[in-house]
Amino acid sequence: MKKWQHRLHTIIFEADTPAGKLFDILLMCVILLSVLCVALESVASIDLHYHNYLKIAEWVFTVLFSIEYLLRIFTVKKPLSYIFSFYGFVDLISILPNYLSLLLVGTNSLISLKTLRLLRVFRILKLTPYIGASNNLLKALVASRIKILVFIFSVVILCVIFGSLMYFIESDASGFTSIPRSIYWCIVTLTTVGYGDIAPQTPFGQLIASIIMILGYGIIAVPTGIVTAEMTKNITEDTNTQVCPYCMKTEHKENSIYCHQCGNLLNDEN
């Protein structure tokens, strides 16, 4: 990899250097501004008065993101590894709507795709102070997925049982007109949301509702405990923000020389 190419790769993909951190911060600001423009364009009164300005701003953002996308491709040794990665796809999808609008008619609905640009903000998590915590949380969520799924399945069973029970206890006048609607009420009550659109009127129904409310507080705490327990098992060594220019692998240990996935040099300047 040529020196200028390696330098660009360090700035664009990593955040261990002052230039890399500055690039990520500027990128985050541009991303947030572009999403703000998309949001403002959806407000009829604002779009009516500032439509042209918003369009110009959107094209400026699109050009900037296009340049960034091309630079990312040019600074890796295997461009396809970036193009077909998750963030490579997000980067592409964030610039396509404007270009497609020039070729196709009726692509205004594609404006919603531009909000995917907000996903790019998560790259900023690669900044050194956050990478350990974010990786640990991700590993904990993956490791506890089976337990969480079993827990959610148990909650669904409880909602079906209590919802069906409330359907037989309460009358249509109370809003419990069907079992699915009663299950909906149970979910809202168990999660302590409580919209108030349906409420039990009978003493027995109110007793059941009270039990569900109390259960709700305990149930909310269970997933937190599961993930926390896994997080204590996944405390790993400090990692940096180095990205392999060959396979795009991240999470390398401090002072690593070779990529722990493909074995290539991480700082190959030749």
Image (cartoon, rainbow, N blue to C red):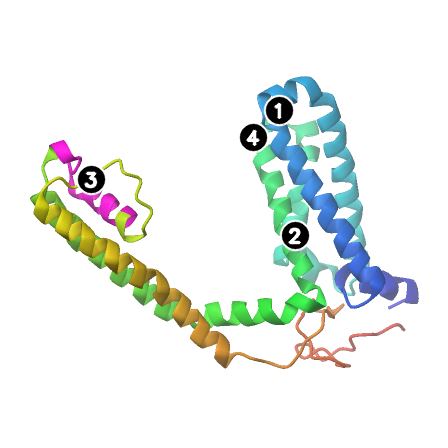
**Structural distance between the alpha carbons of marks 1 and 4:** 11 Å
Residue located at (65% from left, 39% from top): 35
Circle 3 is placed at which residue position? 199
Secondary structure beneath disc 2? helix
The residue that appears at 59% across and 28% down in the rendered structure is 42
Q: Mark 4 or 3, which is nearer the eye?
A: 3
Q: Nearer the viewer, mark 1 or mark 4?
A: 4
Q: Which residue is mark 1?
A: 105
Locate residue 208 relative to residue 65 in the image: left or right.
left
**Is label 1 in a helix, a strand or a loop?**
loop
In the picture shown, does residue 236 fall above or below 32?
below
Crowdedness near tag 1: few (<14), some (14–19) or many (≥20) residues, C-alpha within 10 Å? few
Residue under numbered circle 4: 109
The dot on residue 37 is none
* Amino acid on which disc 2 is placed: Val
- Residue at 80% x, 55% y is 23
Q: Position of residue 102 (x, y in %)?
A: 70, 28
* Residue of label 2: 121
Where are the magenta residues, as a range? 173-188
What is the total number of numbered labels drawn onto the structure image?
Answer: 4
